[in-house]
Amino acid sequence: MKEFSESDLMTYLNDRMEPADVHEFEEALRRDPLLRRKLLVLANFEAELPVALKDEAAVKCDSKKPSARPVMRLVMRIMLPLAAAAGLVLALRLILPQTKPAVHGSLAVAPVIELPVVGHLVELNGDVRISEGHSANSIVVVSSGTVVHAGATIALATNAAACFAFMDGSLLRLYQGTVLVLKQTATGASVELQRGAVDASIRPQPANHMLVMHTSFLYAEIVGTEFRLMADSKSAWLGVRKGEVRVTREADGKKVSLADGNYAAVAPNWPFMRMNARVCPLWKSVCQKAAGTPYP
Amino acid sequence: MSEDKNAESGDWHKGKPLNEALLKHFIEEDSVVRAYVRAVTRGHRETDDVIQDVWRVACMKISEYDPNRPFRSWVMGITRLQLLKWRQNLARSREVLAPDVIDLLADTAETHCEELDMRSHYLRDCLKLLPVHSRVVMQMKYFRDMKIEEIAMGVKKTTAAVEMILVRARRSLRACIEGKLQAEGGATV
């Protein structure tokens, strides 16, 4: 009977074992509890390494308050299944005849349900408040690690900055004066930027579930990318650092696809089209004004 | 299948709420469940898919969970069923472990759950001890899913050098975990 070394176990775990060897390996697993334990130990290492590195990366966002880490782990590990379960409930609600989908401009938005949590704040500087209801009493000044529920509004003072982590590790960096609302719909998470600037680093989204970010003037469907979105009372700007974003103008439904280094804006006297951020200097000055930093 | 339908129509949100204690249970069992699923499915992506299904089903069935029973056994039971379902979908297209071996691995995972938990805990400690450049390269590879060539360009090294950094970093992490386990008097591989 063949002895299986650690290197054989790695070959198996990397799915490179020949089919004939898999049968022999299976037989060995059947009779050897020590081999089963060795396999599980290696599988544990292989499975935990990306998770641990993800935790590390997310915690880096919270360099000032490392105590937020346990909360981070809690959110990262639990939110995905919660979102999936909630998505299922939402899907059931959607097919009920009495349910009417809400419409936001030209974008049909599925009914919104309050989820337990959509993510949490991992870095805070200055005055940051969360409103989770309609009464003034529900506005709370938050600290790093604060869990954010679906439907919450996050508002930053003009001297504040914050970093918000979604359940899957996607990050939003919020700049001074930003106000946004976090929602959860049947088709995925939704972020409504009312004003301010947001840098987004979005992990690849599951099939049929995409993150939608919208302002009064445009909305963007995100499958997994890095970009900055800025909005004020008259305009909205979106520039992509990495990946692709499909942007739609609310007023007429016109769509523009943006890739690395592109941006588009809905603003007075400005054409809604794909622009190159390096060539057109206006992007730089808008970034400087809204976020205080260039992008990318 | 019918069991799942019952769970899905069982309105998990109407049952027992997912309170903090239950969330903690989920976290505590995550590394054991993850190791078990990875050992059976092999691929990272498939592991994530099955784990998502496990937690989705667990969330939906939470009202059926009896707090007087060990949470681990309950979740491992769900995991076992999800893996069998996964196996059923894939059995014709690739070599997958037989159901009895999947069950045996579940038993072994439960038997060694404390060791697996400790290893996960030590992995996080050991990551902090890695040199910064190794950690950066590992982040790029395992967190950002970058290709070796992209990493090499990013850190201005050859692909061979990047591969060597990864090999050494993994080796050093493994050695660190074994060292910590030995210091605690636990079992090592």
Image: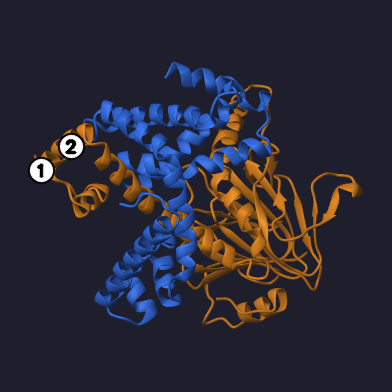
The residue lying toward the viewer, choosing from B37 and A162, is B37
**Res B8 quadrant in image:** top right
In-image side of A56 versus A108 (left or right): left
Asked if A128 appears above or below A190 in the picture, the reply is below
Label 2: which secondary element: helix
Q: Position of residue A114 (x, y in %)?
A: 71, 38
**Res B63 quadrant in image:** top right
The chain letter corresponding to blue is B
In-image side of A166 versus A124 (left or right): left
Determine crowd level at label 1: few under 14, some 14-19, many 20+ residues with C-alpha closer than 10 A.
Answer: few
The residue lying toward the viewer, choosing from A93 and B36, is B36
In-image side of B147 versus B129 (left or right): left
Q: Which residue corresponds to mark 1?
A: A2
* Residue at the (18%, 37%) spot, across then down: A28
Q: Which residue corresponds to mark 2?
A: A28
Determine crowd level at label 2: few under 14, some 14-19, many 20+ residues with C-alpha closer than 10 A.
Answer: some
Asked if A218 appears above or below A189 in the picture, the reply is below
Q: Position of residue A78 (x, y in %)?
A: 57, 43
Tell me, what hue is chain A?
orange
